[in-house]
Structure formats: structure tokens, C-alpha cells
Image: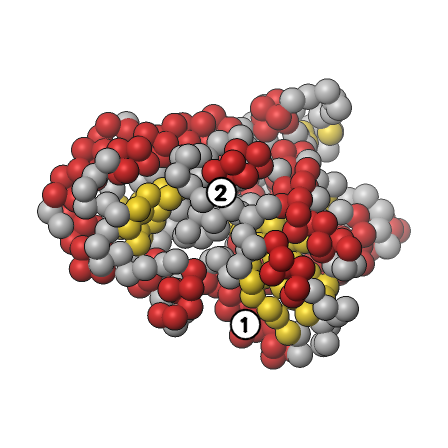
Amino acid sequence: MATKKKSGKWRAQTLAVRGGQLRSEFQETSEGLFLTTGYAYDSPEEAEARFKGADGFTYTRYGNPTTAMFEARIAALEGAPHARATASGMAAVTATFLSSLRTGDHVVGAKAMFGACRYVIEEVLPRFGITGTLVDGEDIEQWAHAMRPETKLLFLETPANPTLAIVDLKAVADIAHRGGARLIVDNAFASPALQRPMEFGADIVVHSSTKYIDGQGRALGGVILCKEDFLKDHLQIFLRNTGPSMSPFNAWVHLKSLETLALRMKAHCANAAKIADFLAGQKKVSRVLYPFRKDHPQHELARAQMSGGGGVVTFEVKDKHAAFRLEQALQLIDISNNLGDAKSLMTHPATTTHQRLSPEARAALGISDGMVRLSVGLEDADDLCEDLGQALAAT
């Protein structure tokens, strides 16, 4: 296969279209989809050389041409030295933890995170003698106080799910590095089109590429982006032997989606900003959370770290009954726990994505029974506002 010539001067949108491109002898313009599990060798000597580390593919669980293109392109967009694709976002999170942690190690995480991530920290890691401390991610002093000599990883989402809390990336990265630890940032809500955590000191970035990277709710996937030392010392050997690999088809879907990521995120942000302003004017809405609105608690920090406010708007109505009535009255927006789709999707976190948390834990995070999360799609914003308006009237 021929590698397309690279240019260190290419800008982000060019990298989104051309980055990591490989072409076969047929010189296809659309990247090839290689649905193969294995690869043939010209000789046993070549097979031996590849298994010793020579360039080339040996088995799709280890690597695949289509997956390699996706990894190279997302790494270029994130500004990361390396990327490894996984079967899902949670596979990426779990592999990052388990590949590098040992019995006796300690993790610090922000409380405001996806429910499955909290499950890994609070339930899975302790089975292996790995302890964790959860802190208020917005309180930098709590991060510093939680550090121990055995702390190896700090983990956070920003914006967080579903509260859209913003964490100061540089400040937390500095705390991690002073303590000899690494900072992991879940960048799924912002995507590399809006935020590049490594520019603020993050060591590892994870994505659920199922979300905005795919963009149309079609295929599961995850990505781990990291530096050479973490890949060599921890991640590569773990992925090769445990097998949370992304399918070549899903890698191809997400590779092609990267071409339009920045364009889609601009439209998501524009729609979300308009809808956030609309909701703020509704009497039955008690609170609106959107990072680029001036009434967001970390508005200035969000603008310092992100180039757009993202495609998610979180807001509150009176209670669970009102939230359910609102969802039942929707005529355009779908009820779904997914996000990042071209179609607008609404979920009630307290009974879906965060239902495993105790009422006290949800209250501590600010997840009320009346909170709903709206993943704003690419429909006409006026149609979305009209749907929300009539649904609110029905509550």
C-alpha cells in the first residue's frame, strides 16, 4: 500500500479529509475498507520479521489498514503522537485504566462523569486492589488534597455528562504532573473539533467515537490517544492480548465521518446556542446549562478551553413527572440515551444514564429529578424550538 504524502503545514480541516490516508495499488480516492482478519506473507521469513516488529499487518486484532487510517487521522486532529481504536468508548476508558494500574495504585476522578465510568472506578478497580477518590472537579484544591504517593492517574470529563461542568485542564494537569501521575481526559462531548486537551497538559485523551465522531448514531467505537511512553510501556501489549479491538467496518465509518466533523460541530453549536437561549426564556424551565452562555458557572473557562459550546444543552423542569410529560409530548425530538447524533435526542439522566447512582450521589452532582439532557441535532433550530415549546406547554 502507498502512503499519501504528508505535509506538516496542513491545517485541521485538511487533516480531517487527508490525514493518515493509505491507498492500494488501485489508487482509490475513497479510503479502502479492508474486511479481513488475517494477512498472507510472501515467505516464512517475512512472517517471522513481522512478528518481531517489522512494518506490516499480521492479524486484525493487532492492526488493520482501515483502522490504522482512522487512528492516524484522529491522532492528527487531536494533536496526539499516537491513537489506538477500541470497540467502544467504555472499552477505551477501561483499557486505559487496566493497562497501567497495579494493586496498591490510586486514582483520582471528577465526580461529574458518565455513570459507567464511575462504575469502573468505584466497582471494577477495587476488585484488583486499586483505590479511587472522587472530587468536585471544579474545585482545584480538592484535586490537590486527593493526591497520594501512590496516585497514578487522574480522570475527568469536560464538559461533563450530564451537568456540562467544566474543569480547568491546565490546573489539574499541573497537579497530576507534580505528583508523578498522568491526566486522562474524556473529550467525547467536545470532540477534537472544539477542544484539544493535550494542548493544556493532558497525557491521555479518550473518546467514545460512537458520539460526535460518528455523528449519525451508526457504529460503536472508542479511541485512546497517548504519548509514546504510555503506548510502549502499558497500552500496546494490553490491547494486543486482551482484544478490545474496533471492527474495520466501524473504523471506516468513523474515518469517513472525520471529514465532516468540524462542519457538523459548527452546526451543532449554532443550534444548541439558539435552543439554550430559547429555553432560558421559558417559564417552565427553571435552569439552563450551556457552556457558552454567560450564566454558566464556568463560562469564561469554557471559552478559554473550547472553540465552541458544544451540541448538548441541559435544563431543568419542576420534577420527574414534568420531565416525563415533556418527553412524552415531543413530536420531533426523540427520547434516547445516546448523543452526538444528527437527530436531536433527549434523555432523563436520573432514570437512565445515572440511575445506578444513589439519590444522594445524584444530588451531590446537581442531577435533579427534573433535569433533562438534550443532544441538539442538525435539524432546523426553529423546528426544534417549536417542538420544545409545545412540549413544555403540555407539562
Q: Amino acid at mark 1?
A: Glu
Using the image, determine if residue 5 lies above or below residue 360.
Answer: above
Q: Which residue is mark 1?
A: 122
| Crowding near the residue tagged with mark 2, few <14, some 14–19, many ≥20 C-alpha atoms within 10 Å | many
Q: Nearer the viewer, residue 306 or 234?
A: 306
Q: Nearer the viewer, residue 318 or 129?
A: 318
Which residue is outermost to the left? 394
Local SS, label 2: loop
- Residue at 72% over, 49% down: 174
Q: Quadrant of the N terminus?
A: top right
Image coords of residue 379 (percent x, y): 30, 31
Q: How far separated are the C-alphas under marks 1 and 2?
A: 27 Å
Using the image, determine if residue 118 lies above or below residue 260.
Answer: below
- Residue at 67% over, 40% down: 200
Say whether residue 28 is visible: no
Say whether residue 19 is visible: yes
Image coords of residue 196 (percent x, y): 62, 38
Image coords of residue 296 (percent x, y): 42, 41
Q: Nearer the viewer, mark 1 or mark 2?
A: 2
Image coords of residue 213 (percent x, y): 50, 39
Q: Nearer the viewer, residue 319 or 252?
A: 319
Q: Which residue is mark 2?
A: 298
- Dividing the picture into quarters, in which one does residue 20 lie? top right
Using the image, determine if residue 308 lies above or below residue 331.
Answer: above
For residue 109, side relative to residue 276 (left or right)? right
